[in-house]
Image (spheres, rainbow, N blue to C red):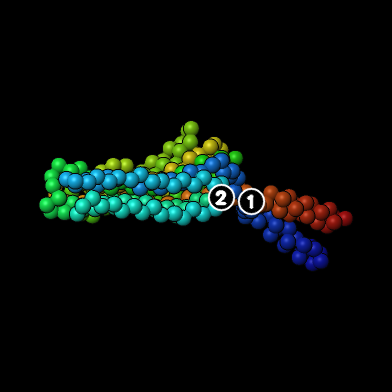
Amino acid sequence: MNSVYLPALRLALVLCALGVASVTHAAPVTIVDDNRLIRSSGSISSETRTNSWNVSDVSANNTGIYNQTLDETRTADPNSARSVATIVSNIGTSVFSASGTAFGVVDLEPGSGNNRFSEADASSQFEVRFVVDEPTNFSLSALLGFDQISGTGSRGGATLSLSSNFFNLSAGTSFTSQDFERNIVLSGILDPDTYTLRVSASVNSDAFSSPSLVSGQSNYNVRLNLAPIPVPAAVWLFASGVGLLFGLRNRLAR
């Protein structure tokens, strides 16, 4: 073979071999809407006084960061109660992440009277709905937990779900009086459809007689990554290599 054509022949073979390589493009995802809610509520009672509260904050934005804390503390004579809800979230076109906590504590002092039901409730919820236009890789990592810090009158939990009309992943416990922690790592492929990612934490701490100290906390931390499935490169590289080989063959045949 004429040595003049050897470099070109090597290039053609390399281009053919690159047919196993891949190229990527932007993840085919469209955000439909999202809803981020935190709530703090409760009531506190003694023999002579009752106090209650219920506050909440909602954010619904297609993109951006939502960082908010609700913290309510009330007292009724020597009794006190506090509820706290937090959320930090970030919504992009290929990454959704959020972390949140719900905390409640009730402290009924000695001598404040019996049969005075008091409670401290809190909740934090993150939800985003999106459309996948073509098969898309996903990786999901999450940590869900509940801690009954003190007393025996605290219940709560944390849950996560990723669902569509034909797909459902769910984990966690919504309402329990026992400590738990779930560490979740999943990956796979999402077929074209409309999906909802929802994660929440809630706590309810209550006491009925004094003295009582009851508290608990729920929490979540989640991250969902979406990425296009690599397309074989090189369909065009392979075609280029084959074309170059045919050209060389014709020249060598002359």
Residue farthest to the top? 165
In the rendered view, does 19 fall on the left or right side of 142? right
Q: Is residue 249 visible?
A: no
Residue 30 placement, left or right of 45: right
Q: Report x, y in % for residue 253.
A: 84, 54
Task: Sort mark 1 into few (<14), some (14-19) or many (20+) by Cα contacts within 10 Å.
Answer: few
Query: Is 252 in front, or is 70?
Result: 70
Q: Residue at x 46, y 55 (%)?
A: 67
Judging depth in this view, the residue of 95 and 113 nearest the camera is 113
Asked whether the viewer can see residue 203, the reply is yes
Task: Please state if 160 lies on the left or on the right of 173 as rendered.
Answer: right
On the image, which quarter does residue 43 sit in? top left
Residue indicated by mark 2:
63
Look at discs 2 and 1 and give the one toward the viewer. 2
Dot 2 falls on a residue whose secondary structure is loop
Q: Position of residue 42 (x, y in %)?
A: 29, 45
- Outermost residue, front direction? 48
The residue carrying mark 1 is: 25
Q: Residue 224 at x, y = what percent?
A: 48, 50
